[in-house]
Each structure stands twice: as structure tokens, then as C-alpha cells.
Image (spheres, helix red, strand yellow):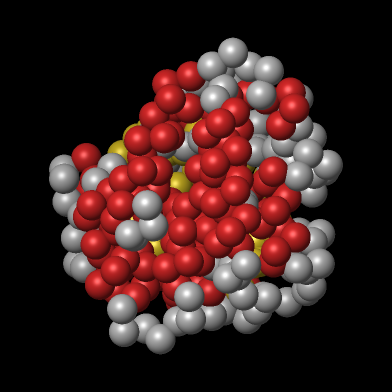
Amino acid sequence: MIIQRKEPTPSAKREVTLEEASKFLSGYYPDGVANTKELSGGKHSNAFSYEYNGQGFIVRFSLENKGFLKDKYAFEHFGDQISIPKVMDMGIYEELYYCISDKISGETVREQYTKEDFSSLPLLYDAVEKISKIKSIGNGYGYLDLNGNAPYQSSLEYIRSVYDSKDLFDWNEIHKIPFVEKNFTDHVTKRMEHFAQFTTEQRELLHGDFGADNVFVKDNIVSGVIDWEKLRCGDHFLDVGRVLLFCPNRKATTSAAMEFYKDKNIQNWKERAAMGVYHVVLTNYAYAALGGNEASCKSSRARLREIEEGLAFV
């Protein structure tokens, strides 16, 4: 049903208990660690925080190491331009890969959202802009490998790949799922195709999974950005689309975007932002459908409508 030719599947995950993590750490640090705690939010790995010699660290475990390698790549190539935790060590423990990195201070954007705190939204848009201006090595558009290369020849080709059955999803199969609304996915595809004409062919860097649990904020600054496994090149407004869509208060996020970008002199920013939202909606709809998440699919229409109204694209 799903064809992953030009973008890999997410890293596999096996649940690791606090007891298992503590056992690993006691072997890794013979003189002991303190305050070991399990962290929530990891989609592809189990993460635990701990202290060693008064300094905070994170250890993660996964059945694959590609996400860890991408984090190391991100830190080494542009950790001097945006705050990214340093990867201290990687290896294999029993049947799992492990990765030890610095601990980022602050709270996640998701933690702020749960408190109805949306004050960091301008910081998120600013961080996306800073990432987009980082010069990337390699060639191509889409998901980056560890040499900085990506498979598509243009930004437009990459954007269209989400509904091109030859690359990522087989929509003929997805539309056979009983709760999938073909009229909705056709609408999203049509709107995305319309706004895709405004994309830039400038090769911009984007995080690929920006926001929520992957951005930390402290003292009104972005204190760190983690989980760079989906790093890619293309139109950075695909990242803007994620910020717009995944804030639970769509009025707050669209208002913040309108205020942030009004004086930025970025050509066609609203059209590109709309394109990013449609791209993210269609991608997530496909994954939700394939995962049997009917509720997520059903809520997509209302969420999208709120963004369209906020950006005046109804």
C-alpha cells in the first residue's frame, strides 16, 4: 500500500524500560549517574535523561541508528548556527543502538501548548527562517542523505511527490480504505497543486518534523532543536505549514504568522505557507489512513478549514 522509494520509513522502535536504561547506564558509567528519568514524546526511540558529574545528558535507544546519524550530521554541519544537542557517543547495546547527547534546557513547544501558552509562535517562525538560510552541501530536493544529496530534481517535483503514486503513496489503494474521503483528498491535492506554482526553486534547508516535541524554548528563545532524521531541502514553507497545522489553536498560529511575515518581504509567503499546509495535511492523512487512524482523518477537514480561514484562503 505504501511505497518508500525516495524517503525512508521512520526508525523502528522497541519499548525500553527505565530498569533496562538504568542497567545500561550503570555499565557505561562505573562511578554511577543520578536522576535517571524516562522522557515522553519519542516516536522512533526511547529517551531517558540523567546527570553525570553535575551535567545533564540524554540517552536514546532504537532498533535503527539512522536517526542518530542524522542528528550527528546536523550538529557537525550547522550546530554553530542553530542550537542542536551535541552527540557524544553512539554504539550498540545488546540488540539496540544507543545514542548519548547533551541535554537541552527548557520546555518543549508541546508542553507550552498544553498550558494554552502560544507565546513561542513567533520564535518558531523565526527559527524556521534561520534554518532555511543555512547553506547545505550536496544536490537535489527532498530527503537528504548523509552526503547532503536528495533524490528530486526540483522543489516542485518534490512537492508533487506526495500525491504521485510512483514515489511515496499508492493513493488508489488508500482510497479503498472505508473511512477515507476521496473528495477531501482530491480537494487538498487540487489546492496544493494551485499553490505549488508559487514555490521557490531556491534550495532551502528544512527540518522536516519541526515543532511539538522537537523544539525547546527557554527564556523567550529557542534553546534547542532536536530529531533531525527528516532533514531535507526544498521550500522551507513546508516547515511553516507544520507550525501552522500542529498548533492546537489555529487562530493563534495563523495570527502569529500574519504578524511575523507581514514585514519580511518574502515573495508569495502566504501562498507558499498554504502550499505547505496542504502538503502536510495530505501526507499526514495518508499515514493516518494507512495506520487505521480514522479519527485523525476525520478531523483533518475541520483543522484545514481553520487554517484556510486564518490565512484568508477560503
Asked whether 31 or 226 is in front, the reply is: 226
Place of residue 172 in the rendered image (x, y in percent of width and height, measured from the top left)? 75, 27
Asked whether 78 or 88 is in front, the reply is: 78
Image point (68%, 75%), residue name: 201
Q: Quadrant of residue 91?
A: top right
Image point (55%, 62%), residue name: 195
Left or right, 261 with reference to 281: left
Place of residue 250 in the rendered image (x, y in percent of width and height, measured from the top left)? 28, 49
Image point (70%, 64%), residue name: 156
For residue 231, say whether it is visible: no
| Number of marks | 0
Left or right, 210 with reference to 159: left
Residue farthest to the top, as pictured: 178
Left or right, 79 with reference to 202: left
Quadrant of the rendering where the N terminus is positioned: top right
Left or right, 10 with reference to 56: right
Place of residue 246 in the rendered image (x, y in percent of width and height, measured from the top left)? 38, 46
Q: Taking 299 as reference, is 86 above or below it?
A: below
For residue 58, say whether it is visible: yes
Place of residue 54 in the rendered image (x, y in percent of width and height, measured from the top left)? 32, 56
Q: Quadrant of residue 41?
A: top left
Q: Taking 75 as reference, is 102 above or below it?
A: above
